[in-house]
Image (cartoon, grey):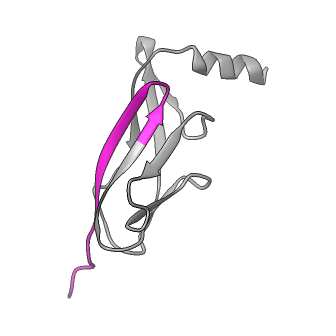
Amino acid sequence: LYLVAAVGICGVSWKGIWMEPFEEHFQPGQSVHYLIKGMRGGDVVADLTSAPDLKVSSKDPTILDVNVTDHMLIARKTGHTQVQISFDQITVLYAAYVMPAAKE
């Protein structure tokens, strides 16, 4: 049964993948839970968050780190980086800014 499900995912032609939610601006110390969704033929949306072939990474983990086990983005320090998501033959980049906390 597991093998059939894995083959079904791998044999699908994906139209697109994306992260939900994706906030472009973060503050140091902020953690955000994410989901990765994909659209396949017939405009069917699937949750790919735990797919074995999914890769989610940060171009600079010292600014924004990715915890793939818990599906979290963790803002470490101020700066600009990109979050890269790859699945099947699709790669998506998101710009991410970690901004200092607003002074009151």
Work out which quarter of the rendered image holds the N terminus and state it: top right
Answer with the quarter of the image where residue 48 lies: top right
Q: Would residue 7 be found to the left or right of residue 1 on screen?
A: left
Query: Viewer-proximal residue, 2 or 93?
Result: 93
Q: Residue at x 59, y 21 (%)?
A: 9
Q: In the picture shown, does residue 76 fall above or below 60?
A: below
Q: What main secondary structure does the magenta stretch of the protein show?
A: strand
Residue 21 seen by the camera:
no
Q: In the picture shown, does residue 93 fall above or below 65?
A: above
98 in magenta: yes
Q: Residue at x 37, y 50 (%)?
A: 83
Answer with the quarter of the image where residue 93 lies: top left
Q: Would residue 59 be found to the left or right of residue 49 on screen?
A: left
Count the labels in the image.
Answer: 0
Q: In the picture shown, does residue 101 fall above or below 95?
A: below
Q: In the picture shown, does residue 49 fall above or below 23?
A: above
Residue span colored magenta: 85-104
Work out which quarter of the rendered image holds the C terminus and state it: bottom left
Q: Residue furthest top?
A: 42
Q: Residue at x 56, y 52 (%)?
A: 68
Percent position of residue 66, x then y:
49, 57
Q: Would residue 68 be found to the left or right of residue 14 on screen?
A: right
Percent position of residue 96, x then y:
30, 57
31 in magenta: no
Q: Residue furthest bottom?
A: 104
Percent position of residue 33, x then y:
49, 56
Percent position of residue 77, x then y:
36, 74
Q: Residue at x 44, y 12 (%)?
A: 41
Residue 102 seen by the camera:
yes
Query: Viewer-proximal residue, 60 or 48?
Result: 60
